[in-house]
Amino acid sequence: MKLPTPIAGASRSAAAALLSASLLFSPLNDNSPLVPAPLRAASTAQARELASGSGSRVNKDPESLLRLGLPGQPKGIRDVQVKIEEAADDLTRLLLIPADQALGGAKGALKSQQSSILKAVPASSASQGAALYDSIVAKVNAASAAVSQGQATVALESLQSSLGDVSKLEESIASAYQQPVPTEATKGNLPWLKGRATVAFELKRPGGKFDVDGTLYDKINLAMVIDGYTAPITGGNFVELVNSGFYNNFKIQRSDGFVVQTGDPKAEGKQEKNGFVPPGGSDVRKIPLEVFVRGDKAPMYGVTFDDDGRGGYASALPFNAYGALGMAREEYDADSASSQWFWLLFDSDLTPAGKNLLDGRYACFGYTTEGARLLSDVKEGDLIVSAKVTAGLDNLQNVQKPALAALAPQ
């Protein structure tokens, strides 16, 4: 049975609460979702940083959020990243003077922090790191020159390219990070993801086309980055299921304007139980709730931010971007997730800065980096033609390789 859609005319705050309450094993729940108890009020003094961002501006860029989720970054590269992103944001709104000021900050950080940034690059990648650094400097200088001539579009293109270099440099630095083995993974014999992986999904509409803002598509192709730094067990579980072919030929099981959700094999008529049953097993494999407070050294398991007395704190990987990936679970059982997951159709009006109802209550394990806006026309019954791991499969840990090979699609 489908979950009821929000009542027409209901306030956005009520709809947001309904959404947060109902990200469970839909669409088979026969009861209307219950609105959760009010979130614990957190004063400014209690929260180091509000969950969705600071101030009134919400960072909705998945690439930026992925950069911010990389561990082991020196302050200097973060300063460079923030100033370049600030300048690029100003240029999208044709604010040339603020953009020029931000670029001045970026150039200053690049000049003063070069030694500390390059020192953080692994020795094996030193030459590549130096080349990326020089490229960033050149592109920032080019953007600055373009701004001084009033060429906002040219400057923005240079900055977007420089941010690609920043991502590569930060990823190189993060590769030296000694990621701890999640104890919950070893206790439960669960797969986990070391670092990151990328996956590709292809969706089709049987007998029809997708209509996105008047443009028709025969198929929708999506690229997603799965983050094992902040959600190693959730990410590892998902990557293993994708690689096994588990989601191939699944239908979209929920699409209500807030989320696009799938992953229930019972709804597909594949089995009697709701969730992933490993080959040769009889019980559904469940994974714990995995949430990560920014600034902590490891995720928390089995508890929400509110349970831990840190409601309102920033999540290391927030539900800020359109197409953010979240793990579905039962509302009153934190450790009930298995195979159902969702794309969040993020709305900054629905979840404004500091009032995100999902961060710290559900596991966010990555972002859609290509094709996210095409999700706006995905409907129940649309078909996942294929789901594949395109990079990072070797980062999947605690999996018997022969078993993994047996599960992999032919």
Image (cartoon, rainbow, N blue to C red):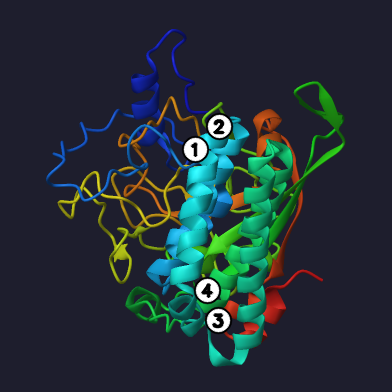
Residue bearing mark 1:
98
Residue bearing mark 4:
195
First in sequence, mark 4 or 2: give its number: 2
Residue at the (61%, 35%) spot, across then down: 92
The disc at residue 95 is: 2
The disc at residue 399 is: 3
Determine contact: label 2, label 1, CB under 8 Å. Answer: yes
Q: Is residue 307 above or below residue 214?
A: below
Give whichever of 193, 331 is nearer the camera: 193
User: Element type at marker 4?
Assistant: loop
What's under tag 2, amino acid-wise?
A: Leu
First in sequence, mark 3 or 2: give its number: 2
Label 3 vs label 2, nearer the camera: 2
Residue at the (48%, 44%) spot, across then down: 101
What's under tag 3, amino acid-wise?
A: Val
Give whichever of 60, 133 is nearer the camera: 133
Question: What is the x, y in percent for residue 220?
Answer: 78, 42
Q: CA distance from mark 1 to mark 4?
A: 35 Å
Q: CA distance from mark 3 to mark 2?
A: 51 Å
